[in-house]
Structures are given as structure tokens and as C-alpha cells.
Amino acid sequence: MIQSTRPAQYGFAERWLPRLVLAPSFLLSLVFIYGFVAWNGYLSFTSSSLLPNYHWVGLHQYERLFANERWWVAVENLFKFGILFIGVSMLVGILLAILLDQKIRQEGALRTIYLYPMALSFIVTGTAWKWMLNPGLGLEKMMHDWGWTSFQFDWLVNPDMSIYTVVIAGIWQSSGFVMALFLAGLRGIDDSIIKAAQIDGATLPRIYWKIILPAMRPVFFSTLMILAHIAIKSFDLVVALTGGGPGFSSDLPATYMYAMAFTRGEMGLGSASAMMMLLTVSAVIVPYLYSELRRGR
């Protein structure tokens, strides 16, 4: 029997070439992502102001952070924004996906219309909604011009309601993306399961509630993680729509961090708030990744 032997250099290339190709991107990620995260963490324990310095102050910046009323307003707003943004986006996205799953006419056109907002940046979305909700330019003025002079919609300039304008704009932009994820999951369900349930006399709403939606649990969790990540790091939408105002009534942690670090020159305090954001993201994502790894084994 003749055995074919491969030159030794081929074995070396197969073993080391992928590592050599991946090494530059790995090193860049190590330095410019994880290295800067570590540096930011270090700055949060220093007295850095306008420029970084290395005077160690321990937990002083975190004590200042937790004693700052504006920070707690931002945290409260994050809970309001996160719960409403994630919940309503999921609900609207699921309903749109179920609608399109009925093989309706003009499905392609409707899918494009629903997905279009996701093609816009949050800056564009925030600017458009700012014009629309501005009492002197948008919806309220239009209603007054039509004769409905008692109509009032001043959420954009109302400190108690301004955060909800951010919620509305975020839902408008993200619902189509959620729809696309759930529609892909629905199209992956075996039609024979649905037909068997219909033969047994199950109604369509019951089929979705008892069979289809439970089978889409991975899609639910993936969508939840994506939306939670978007909510926690939301910055440009708030800047374009409300600027964090009136006052700081619509601040989120990301806008608070930017204001402290780059507007007021409190680099140490801004770094501390950034680390709290990192911990929040980790608290959401790490358990999900751990469960996915366990399921994969």
C-alpha cells in the first residue's frame, strides 16, 4: 500500500497560518478595547479632572457619583426607558412579524417600510422626532393650524415627560428590527406542526400562544439582549432629541458620563460612571452568554 505523505511545511502552515492572520486583529482588540477599558477603570480611582492624572483617591469618585442627584435621575430614566423601550418594541415587533407571517399581499413592500427606520442613525431619528414634537414646529402647531386650538403636546419641553419622547423615538426605530428577527424565527417553524394543531381543532391564536412562540425562546432571549444593550448605551438619540433636558430631566447614564468627562472636565467622575455602565451591561450579557455556552455543551 502506498501512503501519501504531505510535506512538513504544509502541516506547519495549517497550524500556524490562521494564528498569524488573526494575531494583528487580536492584538489591536486587546490594546484598543480591553486596554482602554482597564485604563478607564484605573482613572475612576484617580482625581483626574480635565486631563488624566495618576493621583490615587480610592473609591472617592464612586462616593461622589452615588451622592450626585443627577446620576440617580439618569439611572431612574434608564429603568423607565429600558422597560418601556424593550417591552413595547418586543410587543410591536412580534405583532408585525405575526401579521407578515400570514403570507399577506405586498409583504415585501410592508417589510421594507417597517425596516426602513433601522437604516437611519439615531442622530437622524432624534432630529426628525425633535422637529415633529417641537410645540412650535410639529404636531401641536399642525393641530392648531387645523383649528384644534386646545390640543397640547408639550412632552419635549416638559421635564416630567421628556424621557418618554426618547422612548417613542426608540420604539419607532427598533420595532422593525425586532420584527425581522421574529419573522425569521417564525419562518423557521415547521408547517407540519401548525397543520397538525389545526387538524386537532386549535385556533390560530392558540397555536401561536401554545406552540409557536414557546418554540422561539432563543429568538426572544437574543432580541432581549440586543435591545437591553441598545438601551444601556443610548447616547446619540438623547443628544439629538432632548440634549438631556429640560435641565437634566431626560439624562441617561451615557449622556451623564459624557457631560461629566468632556463638558465639565470631571474625567475621574466620568470614568466612574462609565464603569458602572460596563457593570450594568455585563450583568445583562454575561448570564446569557453563560447559559448559551452551557446549552452548547
Image: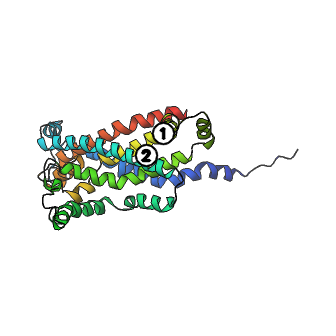
**Residue depicted at x 21% and y 52%:** 258
Q: Where is residue 97 in the image (x, y as percent from the top left)?
A: 46, 49
| Residue 51 shows in this picture | no
Q: Where is residue 271 in the image (x, y as percent from the top left)?
A: 22, 46
| Residue 124 shows in this picture | yes
Q: Residue 131 carries which label?
A: none
**Looking at the image, which is closer to me, 225 or 62?**
225
Q: Residues within 10 Å of mark 1 (few under 14, many from 20)?
A: few
Which quadrant of the view contains residue 272? top left
**Residue depicted at x 19% and y 56%:** 242
Which quadrant of the view contains residue 288? top left
Choose mark 1 or mark 2, whichever is in front.
1
Mark 2 residue element: helix
Q: Which mark is residue 94?
A: 2
**Residue depicted at x 47% and y 63%:** 109
Q: Image check: 161 left or right of 103?
A: left
Question: As displayed, is residue 130 above or below residue 82?
Answer: below
**Residue depicted at x 44% and y 37%:** 289
Colour theme: rainbow
Q: What residue type is labelled 1?
A: Pro
Q: How crowded is mark 2: few (under 14 residues within 10 Å), some or many (20 or more)?
A: many
Q: Position of residue 5 (x, y in %)?
A: 77, 49
Q: Where is residue 55 in the image (x, y as percent from the top left)?
A: 16, 43
Q: What residue type is labelled 2?
A: Ile
Mark 1 residue element: helix
Quickly name the residue at label 1: 205
Quadrant of the image containing the N terminus = top right
Label 1 vs label 2: CA separation? 13 Å
